Amino acid sequence: MKLILIGFGVVGQGFAKILLEKGDDLGARHDFSAQIVGVVTASKGQLYHPDGLDIAHLLRTAETGSFADYPESELLQRDWDANDMILRGSADVLLEASPTNLQTAQPALATCHLALDQGLHIVLANKGPVALDYGGLRAKADARGLHMRYEATVMAGTPTMHLAQDALAGCAIRSARGILNGTTNYILTQMESGMTYAEALAQAQALGYAETDPTADVEGWDAAGKVLILANALFGSSLTMRDLDVRGITDISPEDIDQARQSSLRYKLIAEATPVGGMVSPQRLPVSDPLASVGGSTNAITLDTDLLGEITLIGAGAGKLETGYALLSDLMAIQRET
Ligand code: HSE
């Protein structure tokens, strides 16, 4: 599989590291092999080579913050943007892992449409296009017999979409409810141990959990984007942000957390999607509630199904390898299905 990777931040680097370290094993055990032929970033530059880029070099140059040190070679292109790579290059899959924009989804949305127009499968870690134009992308992918996968957009590589769409394909899912933002769960957990909000947020950023602009995390918009993705993908609804009630954690003070603790309660940012709506809001849960014990950047989701009742999945909600893995699992699914 030849891949064009848009964005080389936490997620893109995590994915590249997994390919570097597990590539041989994936080939031997699953007959899976992938080459990154192009990388496009806003800050580090662009690289394209039709025979595949050297991942070890890519990861090293990312540490310096620029692709300038990537060795020159014949056929290496440094001035192709995403459109050039899609239109003039040779690739099978576009991986969209650039920073999420939940207002317009651009420029990622246009890039995804162009990729589908040109016959590339798309795999997204970027939540914007899936939250804001699921229907448009899905219709185009289906019409052209292409795959569109987006495991990374909800609960990182924890197989939420695989569970809901593949393993539970014969069930009707009535609702999805859980903790869907790693950054805020990390902050709330650390504040319970006495850390300040600012320190906890700084740690979440350093650990690669937070969005490029962490306002999206702490004000609830990142979780709301995930609610839209779940509503679109599981219920076929066409909700928009305006249809959701969204509150984040910025109003919760250390005193609130302390008071809750004295009453054996814990604050959690709960997100819910149903066929008719959705919401994100901080809730005080009894410590006996299973969601109350989900700490740090871990996420959890409970799917209420018609045939199996409730199924709860708990796992990584953010992080470099954790989210990079989601891209790999989507690519392996595409390989199995094509
Ligand atoms: N900023 C997101 C979070 C990353 O904290 O959950 C994973 O979507």
Image (tube, rainbow, N blue to C red):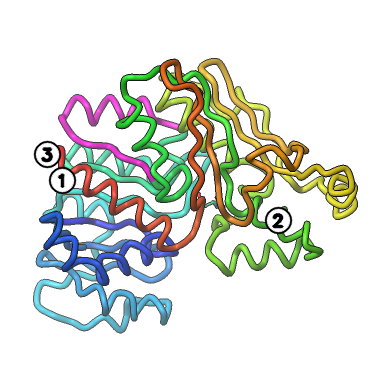
How far, Cα to Cα, is label 3 from label 2? 43 Å
SS assignment for the magenta stretch, majority: helix
For mark 2, does the 10 Å Cα neighbourhood hold few (<14), some (14 to 19), or many (20 or more) residues? many
Q: Quadrant of the C terminus?
A: top left
Work out whether mark 2 precedes mark 1 in sequence or the reverse, and give the earlier one: 2
Residue drawn at 78 percent across, 57 percent down: 192
**How much space separates mark 2 and mark 1, taking CA atoms?**
39 Å
How crowded pointer 3 is (Cα within 10 Å; few <14, some 14-19, many 20+) is rated as few
Where in the figure is residue 135, as x and y percent of width and height? 36, 25
**Count of marks, rendered view:** 3
Callout 2 secondary element: helix
Looking at the rendering, in which quadrant would you find the N terminus?
bottom left
Residue under the point 28% across and 63% down:
39
Q: Are marks 1 and 3 in contact (CB under 8 Å)?
A: yes
Q: Say what amino acid the circle numbered 1 marks.
A: Gln
| Residue 138 is a magenta residue | yes
Report the disc number at residue 177.
Answer: none
Q: Does residue 278 show up?
A: yes
Ligand 1 neighbours mark 1 (CB distance < 8 Å): no
Q: Can residue 107 be seen from the camera position used here?
A: no
Q: Which residue is mark 1?
A: 335
Q: Is residue 80 left or right of residue 196?
A: left
Q: Secondary structure at mark 3?
A: loop
Q: Amino acid at mark 3?
A: Thr
Which residue lies under the disc numbered 2? 189
Residue at 58% x, 69% y is: 206
